[in-house]
Image (cartoon, helix red, strand yellow):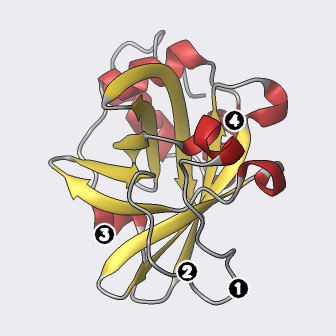
Amino acid sequence: MVPLPTLAPSLDEFRAALAALPLDAQRNFMHGLPKREMRKLWEAGSPVSLDEMIGVEGEIVVQEGQNDLLPFFDRFEKHVVRREGGAQGINVQRFAWVTGPGHFTLRQEGSEVWFDYTVVPATSPEGWPAVVPNDQGLSKLVYGHMIDRVRGVVPGMTVGKVFRHGKPEEHYFMLSRR
Protein backbone atom coordinates (compact mmCIF):
# COMPACT_ATOMS: atom_id res chain seq x y z
CA MET A 1 0.00 0.00 0.00
CA VAL A 2 1.25 3.46 -0.89
CA PRO A 3 0.90 6.06 1.87
CA LEU A 4 -0.06 9.61 1.04
CA PRO A 5 3.07 11.75 0.60
CA THR A 6 2.21 13.88 3.65
CA LEU A 7 1.80 10.75 5.80
CA ALA A 8 4.75 8.71 4.53
CA PRO A 9 7.64 8.10 6.95
CA SER A 10 9.87 9.57 4.21
CA LEU A 11 9.46 10.59 0.60
CA ASP A 12 12.04 7.97 -0.37
CA GLU A 13 9.78 5.29 1.13
CA PHE A 14 6.77 6.83 -0.63
CA ARG A 15 8.59 6.83 -3.99
CA ALA A 16 9.73 3.21 -3.54
CA ALA A 17 6.17 2.07 -2.75
CA LEU A 18 4.70 3.99 -5.71
CA ALA A 19 7.40 2.78 -8.13
CA ALA A 20 6.69 -0.83 -7.09
CA LEU A 21 3.07 -0.60 -8.29
CA PRO A 22 2.01 -1.58 -11.82
CA LEU A 23 1.42 1.45 -14.08
CA ASP A 24 -2.38 1.21 -13.88
CA ALA A 25 -2.23 1.23 -10.09
CA GLN A 26 0.16 4.21 -10.17
CA ARG A 27 -2.33 6.11 -12.33
CA ASN A 28 -5.23 5.21 -10.04
CA PHE A 29 -3.22 6.50 -7.10
CA MET A 30 -2.44 9.71 -9.01
CA HIS A 31 -6.12 10.27 -9.82
CA GLY A 32 -7.01 10.25 -6.15
CA LEU A 33 -4.48 12.81 -4.92
CA PRO A 34 -5.75 16.11 -3.52
CA LYS A 35 -3.91 19.43 -3.92
CA ARG A 36 -2.00 19.25 -0.60
CA GLU A 37 -0.44 15.93 -1.65
CA MET A 38 0.52 17.26 -5.08
CA ARG A 39 2.04 20.33 -3.40
CA LYS A 40 4.14 18.07 -1.15
CA LEU A 41 5.38 16.14 -4.18
CA TRP A 42 6.15 19.38 -6.05
CA GLU A 43 8.17 20.74 -3.13
CA ALA A 44 10.18 17.51 -2.95
CA GLY A 45 10.29 16.90 -6.70
CA SER A 46 13.32 15.29 -8.25
CA PRO A 47 15.09 16.22 -11.49
CA VAL A 48 13.42 15.19 -14.73
CA SER A 49 14.75 15.42 -18.27
CA LEU A 50 13.01 16.32 -21.49
CA ASP A 51 14.16 13.00 -22.95
CA GLU A 52 12.13 11.17 -20.26
CA MET A 53 8.98 13.00 -21.35
CA ILE A 54 9.17 12.74 -25.14
CA GLY A 55 9.97 9.99 -27.59
CA VAL A 56 12.02 9.81 -30.75
CA GLU A 57 11.46 12.17 -33.68
CA GLY A 58 7.82 12.01 -34.77
CA GLU A 59 6.62 9.70 -31.97
CA ILE A 60 3.57 11.09 -30.15
CA VAL A 61 3.75 10.38 -26.44
CA VAL A 62 0.62 10.68 -24.31
CA GLN A 63 0.94 11.98 -20.78
CA GLU A 64 -2.23 11.22 -18.80
CA GLY A 65 -3.00 14.06 -16.43
CA GLN A 66 -4.78 14.86 -13.19
CA ASN A 67 -5.03 18.38 -11.81
CA ASP A 68 -6.45 19.98 -8.69
CA LEU A 69 -9.33 21.76 -10.43
CA LEU A 70 -13.02 20.99 -9.99
CA PRO A 71 -13.87 17.32 -10.59
CA PHE A 72 -15.48 18.05 -13.96
CA PHE A 73 -12.24 19.64 -15.22
CA ASP A 74 -9.61 17.54 -13.45
CA ARG A 75 -8.60 15.00 -16.11
CA PHE A 76 -6.73 15.73 -19.30
CA GLU A 77 -3.91 14.53 -21.51
CA LYS A 78 -0.84 16.24 -22.84
CA HIS A 79 0.22 14.85 -26.22
CA VAL A 80 3.87 15.64 -26.89
CA VAL A 81 6.17 15.07 -29.85
CA ARG A 82 9.78 15.69 -30.81
CA ARG A 83 9.57 17.43 -34.16
CA GLU A 84 11.67 19.62 -36.44
CA GLY A 85 14.48 20.05 -33.94
CA GLY A 86 12.24 20.89 -30.99
CA ALA A 87 9.46 19.51 -28.84
CA GLN A 88 5.83 20.56 -28.83
CA GLY A 89 2.45 19.46 -27.58
CA ILE A 90 -1.23 20.05 -27.10
CA ASN A 91 -3.74 19.57 -24.32
CA VAL A 92 -6.51 17.11 -24.95
CA GLN A 93 -9.52 17.59 -22.71
CA ARG A 94 -13.28 17.61 -23.00
CA PHE A 95 -13.60 21.39 -23.35
CA ALA A 96 -10.96 21.92 -26.05
CA TRP A 97 -13.77 22.91 -28.42
CA VAL A 98 -14.25 26.00 -26.23
CA THR A 99 -10.77 26.65 -24.80
CA GLY A 100 -8.72 25.69 -27.82
CA PRO A 101 -6.08 22.99 -28.01
CA GLY A 102 -3.55 24.80 -25.85
CA HIS A 103 -0.49 24.38 -28.06
CA PHE A 104 2.84 24.62 -26.23
CA THR A 105 6.53 24.04 -26.67
CA LEU A 106 8.68 22.03 -24.26
CA ARG A 107 12.15 22.80 -23.03
CA GLN A 108 14.62 21.80 -20.35
CA GLU A 109 15.21 24.46 -17.70
CA GLY A 110 17.72 23.22 -15.15
CA SER A 111 16.29 20.12 -13.49
CA GLU A 112 12.72 20.85 -14.67
CA VAL A 113 10.84 20.50 -17.93
CA TRP A 114 8.73 23.50 -18.92
CA PHE A 115 5.54 23.29 -20.97
CA ASP A 116 5.54 26.83 -22.38
CA TYR A 117 2.19 28.12 -23.64
CA THR A 118 3.69 31.55 -24.35
CA VAL A 119 5.74 30.10 -27.23
CA VAL A 120 3.53 28.20 -29.66
CA PRO A 121 4.99 26.14 -32.50
CA ALA A 122 4.71 27.40 -36.08
CA THR A 123 2.91 24.27 -37.29
CA SER A 124 1.34 21.15 -35.82
CA PRO A 125 1.72 17.49 -36.77
CA GLU A 126 -0.73 15.95 -39.21
CA GLY A 127 -4.02 15.13 -37.48
CA TRP A 128 -3.57 17.71 -34.72
CA PRO A 129 -5.63 20.89 -34.45
CA ALA A 130 -4.23 23.90 -36.26
CA VAL A 131 -1.94 26.12 -34.22
CA VAL A 132 -3.81 29.03 -32.66
CA PRO A 133 -2.51 31.66 -30.25
CA ASN A 134 -3.06 31.11 -26.53
CA ASP A 135 -3.56 34.80 -25.81
CA GLN A 136 -6.94 35.31 -27.50
CA GLY A 137 -10.55 34.45 -26.68
CA LEU A 138 -11.24 31.84 -24.02
CA SER A 139 -7.81 30.31 -24.61
CA LYS A 140 -6.36 33.36 -22.89
CA LEU A 141 -8.22 32.51 -19.67
CA VAL A 142 -6.94 28.93 -19.67
CA TYR A 143 -3.52 29.02 -21.34
CA GLY A 144 -2.59 32.69 -21.64
CA HIS A 145 0.80 33.73 -20.23
CA MET A 146 1.23 30.26 -18.69
CA ILE A 147 4.16 27.94 -18.19
CA ASP A 148 3.70 24.55 -16.54
CA ARG A 149 6.87 23.48 -14.75
CA VAL A 150 7.30 19.78 -13.96
CA ARG A 151 9.53 17.79 -11.65
CA GLY A 152 10.01 14.05 -11.26
CA VAL A 153 8.12 11.78 -8.87
CA VAL A 154 8.99 8.25 -10.04
CA PRO A 155 10.09 7.07 -13.50
CA GLY A 156 7.30 7.92 -15.95
CA MET A 157 5.46 10.18 -13.50
CA THR A 158 5.88 13.90 -12.88
CA VAL A 159 4.27 16.61 -10.81
CA GLY A 160 3.74 20.13 -12.07
CA LYS A 161 2.92 23.61 -10.91
CA VAL A 162 1.33 26.42 -12.91
CA PHE A 163 3.14 29.72 -13.39
CA ARG A 164 1.42 32.70 -15.00
CA HIS A 165 3.26 35.89 -15.93
CA GLY A 166 6.29 34.25 -14.28
CA LYS A 167 4.57 34.01 -10.90
CA PRO A 168 3.57 30.74 -9.19
CA GLU A 169 -0.09 29.91 -8.77
CA GLU A 170 -1.46 27.43 -6.26
CA HIS A 171 -2.45 24.94 -8.95
CA TYR A 172 -0.80 21.56 -9.26
CA PHE A 173 -1.12 18.59 -11.60
CA MET A 174 0.42 15.19 -12.20
CA LEU A 175 1.34 13.41 -15.41
CA SER A 176 1.86 9.72 -16.10
CA ARG A 177 3.50 8.67 -19.35
CA ARG A 178 1.56 5.99 -21.22
Q: Secondary structure at mark 1?
A: loop
Label 1 CA crowd tier, 10 Å (few <14, some 14–19, many 20+): few
Sequence-earlier tag: 4 or 3: 4
- Residue 119 lies, in percent from the top left, at 38, 59
Q: Secondary structure at mark 3?
A: helix
In the image, farthest residue toward the front:
136
- Residue 67 visible in the shown view: yes
* Residue under pointer 1: 127
Gap in angstroms between the C-alphas marked 3 and 2: 20 Å
Q: Is residue 86 left or right of residue 117?
A: left
Q: Relative to residue 55, is residue 168 depicted above or below?
A: above
Q: Is residue 5 left or right of residue 176?
A: left
* Residue under pointer 3: 51
Sequence-earlier tag: 3 or 1: 3
Q: Secondary structure at mark 2?
A: loop
Residue at image coords 55%, 59%: 133
Circle nearer the viewer, 3 or 1:
1
Gap in angstroms between the C-alphas marked 4 and 3: 24 Å
Gap in angstroms between the C-alphas marked 1 and 4: 28 Å
Q: Disc 2, disc 1: CB below 8 Å?
A: no
- Residue 171 lies, in percent from the top left, at 52, 24
Sequence-earlier tag: 4 or 2: 4
Where residue 124 is drawn, which disc sits there? 2
Label 4 CA crowd tier, 10 Å (few <14, some 14–19, many 20+): some
Q: Nearer the viewer, residue 126 or 149?
A: 126
* Residue under pointer 4: 31
Q: Nearer the viewer, residue 103 or 162?
A: 103
Residue at image coords 44%, 45%: 158
- Residue 35 lies, in percent from the top left, at 57, 18
